[in-house]
Image (spheres, rainbow, N blue to C red):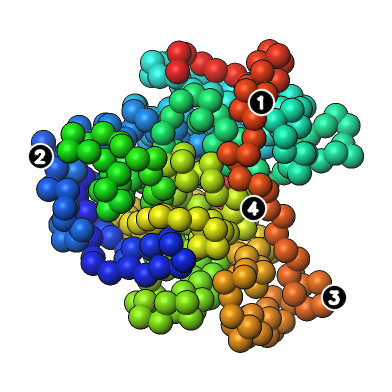
């Protein structure tokens, strides 16, 4: 892979957000890495250095009642050396179909995989044993953890850690094009590699010598929609436009010299990071999870590099989820800005007015959105206790092949 990297970045606290890089070549041939000190320009990544990351990468696919044949296509795009973990919140019949398909796929392709259902009771028990009751719906019988994409991602982080991975990437299960999925995974490897170099987290042989805090967020080339029978390649998603605009306003209030539209990945569902970072971040519920990563890192964490990369492939996904879904996403995303200690009062006030005018349905009686539920950092969990509880319930975590 070859990326074109623009110089330029801005900081929120000790979190550096870098200008959007672009994919120049999906495959740059059998080349050596460009010298590691190049922070900008055209940077090529050898197959070997992509492999080094992929062999340490877990790809987590959160999935809730997507068509099984579409999930099947997603699996086919994930490079062989990355380990796939599916975290499902689908209806039981669908889940069984997902397991059957996934098992067959792993066996035919001679690769390991793991799949789990988010609401199985042993998962809730494992969170309780490990010391995170907040995620469990304590009044449910049988016990279960809360629904939501953020919650599914947290399970993915824990499993990636238990499987001994160093990096984690997330891919939505409703991607219609396996080739796009493949590009996202390659961008994760190249982007992580690049971010590690920016952090000087590797020695001269490319081995990690400090636990890195790096993240890659994907900006889709476009999000196609069908309008009056024709495909329109919209440059941005409906929720992203709004969330990015307010994120950039916040960024420029904190860092006045920041490029005007530096943040283009506020909502990036497709992103990857070092487990070190995933363990120290707090995850928020549902669709607040991605914007909240930027806010939480900016509020609390040191020495984080966030790289954004624009892909070549468009993002074809299920666009039938409707206007309410988009509004919920916008409100959840913007709520992370309203409640942040980073946000100056004038921006909070303007944002309140915007919400009152544009998204009144999502507000409480005080005219503000509910604060998204957020969980303690995953590193506060006892992993031994989580593992022991999960292992005691045979059949909850289904592992195919030998990870
Ligand atoms: P959008 O593409 O950003 O509009 O969001 P989607 O609705 O497509 O959700 C992104 C991914 O998360 C899809 O693969 C969904 O199936 C999945 N997802 C959404 N909610 C949940 C949930 O509660 N649990 C799990 N496990 N997955 C979810
Ligand atoms: Co989607």
Front label number (1 vs 3): 1
Front label number (4 vs 1): 1
What secondary structure is found at the residue carrying circle 1?
A: helix
Residue 223, image quadrant: bottom left
Q: What residue is disc 2 on?
A: 31
Q: Nearer the viewer, residue 79 or 207?
A: 207
Q: Which residue is painted at 12% across and 47% down in the image?
A: 34
Q: Nearer the viewer, residue 326 or 286?
A: 286
Quarter of the figure that contains the C terminus: top left
Q: Nearer the viewer, residue 137 or 149?
A: 137
Front label number (4 vs 3): 4
Q: CA distance from mark 3 to mark 2?
A: 60 Å
Q: 35 left or right of 283?
A: left
Q: What residue is disc 3 on?
A: 365
Q: CA distance from mark 1 to mark 2?
A: 43 Å
Labels 4 and 1: the sequence-earlier one: 4
At which x and y percent is residue 117? 67, 30
Labels 4 and 3: the sequence-earlier one: 4
Q: What residue is disc 4 on?
A: 284
Check whether the beta carbons of the residues at disc 1 and disc 2 lie within 8 A of each other: no
Crowding near the residue tagged with mark 4, few <14, some 14–19, many ≥20 C-alpha atoms within 10 Å: many
Q: CA distance from mark 1 to mark 3?
A: 39 Å
Q: CA distance from mark 4 to mark 1?
A: 20 Å
At which x and y percent is residue 254? 47, 77
Labels 2 and 4: the sequence-earlier one: 2
Cβ of mark 3 under 8 Å from ligand 1: the answer is: no
């Amino acid at each position: 892979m070859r990326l074109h990297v623009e110089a330029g970045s801005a900081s929120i606290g000790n979190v550096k957000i870098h200008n959007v890089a672009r994919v120049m070549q999906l495959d740059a041939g059998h080349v050596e890495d460009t010298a590691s000190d190049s922070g900008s320009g055209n940077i090529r990544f050898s197959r070997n250095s992509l492999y080094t990351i992929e062999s340490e990468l877990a790809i987590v696919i959160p999935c809730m009642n997507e068509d099984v044949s579409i999930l099947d296509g997603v699996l086919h795009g994930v490079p062989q050396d990355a380990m796939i973990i599916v975290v499902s919140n689908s209806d039981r019949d669908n889940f069984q179909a997902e397991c059957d398909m996934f098992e067959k796929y792993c066996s035919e392709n001679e690769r390991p995989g793991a799949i789990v259902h988010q609401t199985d009771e042993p998962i809730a028990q494992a969170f309780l044993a490990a010391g995170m009751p907040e995620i469990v719906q304590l009044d449910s019988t049988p016990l279960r953890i809360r629904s939501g994409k953020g919650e599914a991602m947290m399970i993915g982080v824990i499993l990636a850690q238990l499987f001994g991975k160093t990096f984690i990437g997330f891919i939505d299960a409703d991607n219609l094009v396996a080739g796009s999925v493949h590009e996202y995974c390659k961008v994760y490897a190249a982007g992580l590699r690049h971010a590690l170099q920016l952090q000087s987290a590797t020695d001269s042989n490319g081995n990690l010598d400090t636990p890195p805090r790096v993240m890659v967020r994907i900006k889709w080339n476009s999000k196609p929609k069908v309008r009056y029978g024709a495909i329109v390649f919209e440059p941005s998603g409906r929720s992203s436009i709004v969330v990015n605009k307010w994120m950039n306003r916040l960024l420029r209030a904190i860092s006045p010299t920041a490029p005007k539209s530096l943040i283009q990945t506020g909502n990036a569902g497709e992103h990857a990071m070092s487990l070190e970072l995933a363990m120290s971040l707090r995850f928020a519920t549902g669709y607040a999870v991605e914007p909240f990563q930027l806010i939480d890192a900016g509020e609390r964490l040191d020495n984080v590099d966030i790289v954004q990369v624009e892909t070549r492939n468009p993002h074809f996904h299920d666009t039938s989820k409707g206007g309410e879904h988009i509004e919920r996403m916008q409100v959840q995303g913007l709520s992370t800005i309203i409640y942040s200690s980073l946000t100056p009062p004038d921006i909070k006030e303007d944002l309140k007015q915007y919400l009152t005018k544009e998204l009144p349905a999502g507000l409480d009686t005080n005219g503000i959105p509910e604060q998204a539920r957020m969980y303690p950092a995953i590193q506060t969990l006892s992993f031994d206790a989580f593992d022991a509880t999960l292992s005691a319930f045979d059949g909850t975590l289904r592992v195919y092949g030998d990870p």
